[in-house]
Image (tube, rainbow, N blue to C red):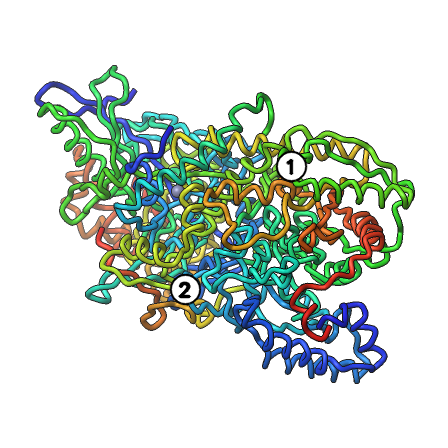
Amino acid sequence: MRGFTIATALEALDKREITASWLFDTCANAITTHDGTLNSFITPTLEQGRAHAKAADDARAQGKTGPLLGIPLGIKDLFCTTGVRTTAASRILGDFVPPYESTVTQNLLDAGAVFAGKTNLDEFAMGSGNLTSAFGPVQNPWKRTGSEAALVPGGSSGGSAAAVAGGLVLGATGTDTGGSIRQPASFCGIVGMKPTYGRCSRFGTIAFASSLDQAGPMTRDVTDSAIMLGAMAGFDPRDSTSVDRAVPDYRAALERGVRGMRVGIPKEYHAPGMSPEIEALWTQGIDWLRAEGAEIVDVSLPHTKYGLPTYYIVALAEASSNLARYDGVRFGKRVPAETLDALYEATRAAGFGAEVRRRVLLGTYVLSAGYYDAYYLRAQKVRTLIQRDFLSAFENVDVLLTPTAPSAAFATNEVPDDPVQMYLNDIFTVPASMAGVPAISVPAGLDGQGLPLGLQLIGKFFDEETLYAAARVLERSAGFTHVPALWAGAAA
Amino acid sequence: MSGYRIEGSTGLWEIVVGLEVHAQVISQAKLFSGASASYGGEPNTHVSLIDAGFPGMLPVLNAECVAQAVRTGLGLNAEINLFSRFDRKNYFYADLPTGYQISQFAHPIIGTGTVEIELADGTVRHIGVTRLHLEQDAGKSMHDQDPTRSFIDLNRAGVALMEIVSEPDIRSPEEAGAYLRKLRQILRYLGTCDGNMEEGSMRADVNVSVRKPGEEFRTRCEIKNVNSIRFVMQAIEVEAARQIEVWESGGTVDQETRLFDSARGETRSLRSKEDAHDYRYFPDPDLLPLVIEQPWIDALKAALPELPEAKRARLEAEYGITRYESGVLTVEQAVADFYETVARDADARLATNWILGDFFAALNRTGRSIENSPVSAQALRELLGLISDQTINGKIAKDVLEIMVETGEAPLQIVDREGLRQVTDTGAIDAAIADILAANADKVAEYRSGKDKLFGFFVGQTMKAMKGKANPAMVNDALKKQLAE
Amino acid sequence: MPLDAQTVRRIARLARIGVADDELVPLGHELDGIIGWVEQLGEVDVDGVPPMIGTGLAMPRLREDAVTDGNRREDVLSNAPDRVDAYFTVPKVVE
Ligand SMILES: [Mg+2]
Ligand SMILES: [Zn+2]
């Protein structure tokens, strides 16, 4: 639904210019038309969605309201949804149908949202290109100028990003462990917000790395992001890491502007080999904020280069343990065998893809006897240093501005063989995840080949409001109105 | 030091034992979920999706389980750690739904403490407690229902356990038994674990090694999940004998996990060595460190019940009973409470003798426990009151107790209905004695010529004549008087 | 330290992921590349630095001791790949 954003659709719904059913059917048609190409959905739920859209119309007719009443959304297939197959894009979950609803999706349902289906992702959210899904890769709706080559949407929330960018839904949920909301948002030209760790409940969301996983909204614009986060966020007593803190009115912060805001530019983010286009866009972003009255401050985050290796140790250690429950006994896929251990080994060999296997083995290794201190314990200490970098930077500045990713979307055949090269995609997003601070990616321009590039703003703990205010300024200044190839050809 | 030694072919051996006791915490709900922690239940009913390890499910710590651990720590005179933490112990097993057990490995909630034990010969020893930590129980596998499959019931999965680890201070099977009995007693007094070993709410892993006296420790073996005190003592004996034989035949004992087979009276290796455990402990990222505060601990401490040692000392001082008697009367809190209800402001000696004697005998005979005793403490107290105020004599009281046990009637009601009141009428006693002396002139003559022993015969005859109801002291006095005439 | 086939086999065994014999060496190379890369953390001075636990934001939280869950056997068993009556099953475990 390229024509509407969440905010404009809500306005039209309230004015009775459109109905939720019409809005949903429009999305459903777009899904039917385009998802054969994009593969952004694993399990569309069009029938259930239609019923919910109808219910939303009825509710509105009875004078009821809701912050997302009647808005069609995509749900990353990592959020458990009652009665709807939830796969984490893994074979190992088989036809798992949760008898429970994740807190985040329940919050969205309570806000009146209508789910169009479960979106594709990297298997167990492990990847940066949406290439590891057991349900096949997702295609980015964007194409390079003059090229038909399919590009990756980024990962792991690539299905959500592609569905939003392609206009198949008005917004979608993502989860971000080391950049899985922000990097695909950058690749697909949309807004992706990773809130402060503890802002959105993890209850009912399939875990990758518990100390890092955080849900967030993926939307067409900054305003929609603020609306959607307001509905997703909140304290949840069922998640011990959820923070008991009121959810502010994010939308009210949108037009605060950046006058007097101190914006830090971390010098370590000038990564060697970064493309001049991204370097230029970053400079452009600095100029935009300065022009609106922000004060630009050079800062240093000295442990930045250790972010990625630290992340891989911590995240993979936690993942190796979190994924132990997929054993073929209580739910999911099972490969029968003669003995219990043979059943485990056969089930997990057949059920996990190559990248998940690689990560579980690495996580097992770094925790194993004799290596714990050298790897895991050391990484958690370095993580403290990384967090301290941010805390001391935030003594002087209100936000940090950086590029979101070191490149634009790439083609499947350009994926490096070396996993470490692939991991470098997350180089700018991982540090904020390690520190637990919020960060948002805003589409800021196109590269020379016509592909979107994002800028990232990183904020203080629980200061999503300042992020939204600054993001809105970037958005306005960039005037990003480009549309993906999917729409350029079609009747936009 | 204990003198327990085992004689081998190369000389005397000493055994070294440490116990890891898993005690189920008394609580309504499980350690990290709201499912019921109660025993039994249809299979897989006391199970939440958290216990079953479903995707996205998260643990939230039960406050009462923490309080129970702290109470237990206080009862063991142990350090209470204001900071503790939950770690994951990673391993795969059929009854472990998440693939890890949440336990407190690096930072237990309770540090070092001590348990005082008393042996049969009166020796007192102090067994060190290394630590106490909270952890989850596993589910149950059943192997007998199907030829090719084991069945899994997760009702127990996630129930809170306290693992109480002793120092390797135990030197004999007897000490192990005494330690477990004492620990169970303390837990039951505290109300933190019911100590029911049949239902598995208390089980022990037994670490056994042997050495020549004065030597360093040798390799130990862990005997897993022994579920009675008797079996623990047996397992230590047979495992020590096995190890001695290994050493003496020139072999070496391998550190391994073993199982005690009570039917065969032997231990055997449980898991092969190649499958060495590597639990990959790390802090559970789903849980924050557990931080507790001193005032909360102080409040728990203030509300703690009187514990066995303190109670013993007090009972000895207040009721003038012996160390042996105080031991028996405080085995269970309910017994001590019963005793005090009977003995308070009464003839404590009489109460002690009656409870340890006739009353315990009646309990044994009827197979009842103190909690469902056929005679209430109040009723027993009344009965003994009837002795003290001379309404009945001790002999008659025994008969009355029998009737009380059978019918549950109040003692005075029985006494009145059966006409058992003691006869204190000196006239009636004198008359009865006169008759007996007249009928036994020969015996009177023998008595008077110095055969003192016959006095008992006259007492017996008099009591018999008075259907046992005469006041024994008055019978004695009157007999002495008449025989002296 | 290179990850030889034996090490890979040991880790795979710990993780209960079946790995074919002919995969052990290539997998070892792959893992070794990543391990070599993360080892750059060895150069960071972490003396006296506490390891991070959580992100230091949430307050420790305790639940009241009340039965609020359970008695949902069908929910618990409805996804079981092999169930018999009210039980999950596994291949027979011999102890
Ligand atoms: Mg043990
Ligand atoms: Zn244990």
**B429 horizontally vs C92: left or right:** right
Mark 1, ligand 2, within 8 Å: the answer is no
Name the element at disc 1: loop
Considering depth in this image, is A360 or B72 the residue closer to the camera?
A: A360
| Residue at the far top in the pictured view | B214
Badge 1 crowding class, 10 Å Cα cut-off, few under 14, some 14 to 19, many 20 or more, is few
Q: Position of residue B291 (x, y in %)?
A: 61, 38
Type of amino acid at the residue the image marks with label 1: Glu
Please report the residue visible at 73 percent of the width from the left and 34 percent of the height from the top. A266
Quarter of the picture holding the C terminus of chain B: top left
Pinpoint the chain carrying mark 2. Answer: A
Name the residue nearer the viewer: A411 or B316.
A411
The residue carrying mark 1 is: B293
The image position of residue B237, as x and y in percent, is 19, 34
Who's the residue at 60% across and 77% down the image?
A33
Residue at 54% from the left image edge and 67% from the top image edge = A39
Q: Position of residue B467 (x, y in %)?
A: 29, 58
Tell me if A48 is positioned left or right of B73 in this view.
right
Residue located beneath label 2 in the image: A332
Quarter-of-image position of residue B259: top left
Name the subunit of mark 1: B
* 2 vs 1, front mark: 2
